[in-house]
Image (tube, rainbow, N blue to C red):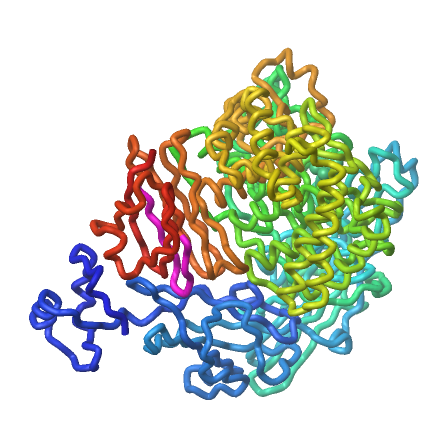
Amino acid sequence: MECFLPFFRFDKINFCKMKRYTLSIGAEIKLPLLIALLLTSQICFADEPLSIKNLRTEYHENPSGIDVEKPRFSWTLEGDGRNRSQSGYQIVVASSTQKLNAGDWDIWDSGKVNSDRTNQIVYEGSSLQSGSKYFWKVKTWDETGVASGWSAEANWSMGLLNFSDWNGKFIGLDVGHQTGNKYDSLYLPPARYLRKSFNIQKKIKKATAYTTALGLYELRLNGSKVGEYYFLPGWTDYNKRVYYQTFDITKELKVGENVVGAVVADGWYSGYIGYALLVRLDKVRGFYGENPSFMGQILIEYEDGSKEVIVSDTSWKANQGAIREADILMGESHDARLNNSGWDAPGFDDNSWKRPKIYTHPNGRLQAYPGSLIEERERLISKKVTEPKPGTYVFDLGKNIAGIAELKVQGPKGTSIELKYGEILNADGTVLTENLRRARATDTYILNGEGTEVWQPKFTYHGFQYVQVTGFSSKPDVDAITGIVMSSIETNASSFSSSSNMNNILFENIKTTQSANFFEVPTDCPQRDERLGWTGDAQTYCRSATYNSDASAFFTKFLIDLDDAQRWYGAYPNFAPFPYSRPNQYAPAWMDAGVIIPYNMYKVYGDTRIVEYMYPGMQKFMEFQADASTDYLRPGGGNNWGDWLSVNEKTSHDYIGSSFYGYDADLMAQMAKALGKNDDYEKYKSLFENIKKAFSKKYILENGYTTEDTQTTYALALYFNLYPEELAQKGADRLAEKIRLNGNKFSTGFLGTKHVMLALSKYGHDDLSYKLFQQTEYPSWGYSVVNGSTSIWERWNSYTKDADENSSLNSAMNSFSHYAFGSVAEWMFIHGLGIDTEDAGFRNIIIKPAVSKEIGFMKGSYDCINGTIASNWELKGNKLTMKVFVPVNTQAKVYIPSAKPSAIKEGKLNLSKVDAVKILESGSEEMVVQIGSGDYTFTTIIN
Ligand code: BGC
């Protein structure tokens, strides 16, 4: 029990809850008596028991069909009052809801575990069975030993764990092959339709579908799509692994005739990928195989205990249908006259359909999908429709997204509607498509003429704000086109607002662009013939990504891709998956994603399992770097993009190579320590020291300048701790001076930009960070905002409102949806709002906002793995108010800048009188205090 009185405030009492308070000796007391006691003496009473939220298994809410042998559990805690924490937990797992509720925990009972852990808790019960479903709940004990109630129930199911569990064959349909010249003409084969009718005579207890494809598939059952996902089964190196999905279809089946169907298209497996066509690689499509195929099985368990399995085999029927072309980059064509209406439902005559063709099993292992699948995230109504040319209509969806357009149309049979997509408009109001390069990005729909027709493509997506439509006989209504925003993630983990409207728009733009590019893999951009998991972009943005979304499962999946794509000699590639057969595809600061992203998974989510998984590869990568180095300096090597898209300053590739090598060594040491690999910890620590010595000898001058004197050189060396301690401040001051001399503007590209912000704040130049943050002249983030952007651009100057200047831009290499420069989100949260984690996993939180008169207030929150952290600060003249909230089971170090630390108040009391606040350090201009969970308001005066 906690003595609460010293900081008791009546405005905070929730009287409704008061009758549940008990004396420390446990006796119940009446309300008037309690008030009297409160007023006269120091009594102790318990807070409400903790409540348990957000139960997750392997980062997912109630996942279907996982194949992790020992899944990890997590939850968050909520509770009134301050300093609340967990002292113990009990997890129970049962084979049914009934058993779970009856206390018959036949699968696992952890018993009471005295622990404050609420995540990364490993299942330790008996071995989990293929195809079984499990139900779990958790109970916790708080800091005083008071038990919570049981949490709500959660569940997960296991997928098919053994190869022998799979009985289906990969089935498809031969539709011919490419004949023309592969560079000059596109080959876009039709989708394949597969169906099987089967009869059910008995009452069903449970039915589950396990399905996958080489290519993309949509599963259909009795006339409807199964599940809400797109782009199944996901993109992998299909020679190494092929993911499958598990769907509970108990409710979709019925007694009598049932029909299962699958539509299959090329996708990443056999369609066009990336820039292969543009640069005329040996292969331009079909990187993993020529023909898409489907494989799956439905397991039906009957009430009478018997079972039946429907598998994909030659008893199915196959045909072509309405989807005449389907390619991720090129678009989709749908001829609704060929709809074969009812093909996926009972009662359809499939006599004219063929037997499917059997394709060989891929080399890759069948595995459950570990990431976050692509879903519809938002529907956008068009803001306006224009007619720049007679019969050509342009729909403006208001923001630059990734996804598809849903078409609503009525007209005569055979009418062809063409949809083209673009991010910006030409001067004449038509969509600009030059920057799509060889991505045709065109969809076509041919009407069947039967009333209002609503259509969405299934196997393509585009990066766009505008849809240009031709084929309407008259001006269409605004609802003829609806934008469907698709993404693997939801950007809902944080909030941010400030007194700068420009910066608030910037935050929205960052989220929009993250959403558009967290699309199965972290793509560079969603529109042109690229859309690859570029590693440089991903490493620079990964920490920002975790602030804006729960990216844990998404990055888990991507790291498996990266590990699969590691070059045999140890380098990580330029992008992953890596479908091309090109040697030497690596680059400094791109390949380092193989170390930086796992480190961030550890830092943000406390995830040591993924670090363990990546560890052998990371060690090999470190050896590759050691081999390539001379006296601890790693040269640029490989592809050299340097500080990609920097402005007026070039940092040498060798400098970048060596600085990232040092950073890797430091992160490896921290990860080795986290895994308890002490020898490796020592090894990487001393490697870091050696690199630092060699690096500073070569690149840092005695006056603190770098030899190359670019903004990026300072930012990298300072942020990566490669400066000799005594020179670091001088280096930071020189960086600041250079920025001022440059008119408070950047000269940096993908690598330097966020590190400039982080390095400035690290060395006391917050005011200057804010000048950069709020800058609106090129190059700056503000420049894109004032030029009307709704997204983050690839280039600092992708576009200007000035039409003349636009003509000089490189329009073929100019994406309007590139998240790399959005990596300022990391600075916004770590420094602007000041929300960071001291160790790994946000148990020991840091609240250290960069309070500055350059901006009036900042307000925001972040849902970390332990719950919501909030930090609001506001300056009114010299008066600073900081409102902080940290979740149950965490503590925070709060840094309060103050002209008079001894006069800081929390609520109405002087800090020294608030028991819940522990003063750690009191300097002349700052006070550092420690708080436990709860909300706090600090007020003070600053200089
Ligand atoms: C991509 C980048 C990527 C780069 C390598 C580009 O084409 O769009 O974002 O990192 O290539 O320089």
Q: x%, y% of residue 894?
A: 39, 51
- Find the magenta span and give its range: 881-893
| Residue 850 falls inside the magenta stretch | no
Report the side of 207 relative to 832 (left or right).
Answer: right
Q: Residue at x 36, y 32 (%)?
A: 856
- Residue 873, how many percent across, how many down? 35, 41
Q: Quadrant of residue 42?
A: bottom left
Residue 588 relative to residue 754: left or right: right
Pinpoint residue 756: horizontal percent, then vertical percent: 59, 35
**Residue at image coords 74%, 33%:** 440
- Check the image and report above or below for 209 versus 237: below
User: Can residue 831 be spotted in the picture?
Assistant: yes
Quadrant into which the C terminus falls: top left
Question: Residue at 44% across / 83% down in the picture?
Answer: 112
Comparing 854 with 683, the one in front is: 683
Q: Position of residue 468 (x, y in %)?
A: 62, 28
User: What residue is at 88 percent from the left and 39 percent from the top?
Assistant: 281
Question: Is 884 a magenta residue?
Answer: yes
Looking at the rendering, the quadrant in which ligand 1 lies is top right
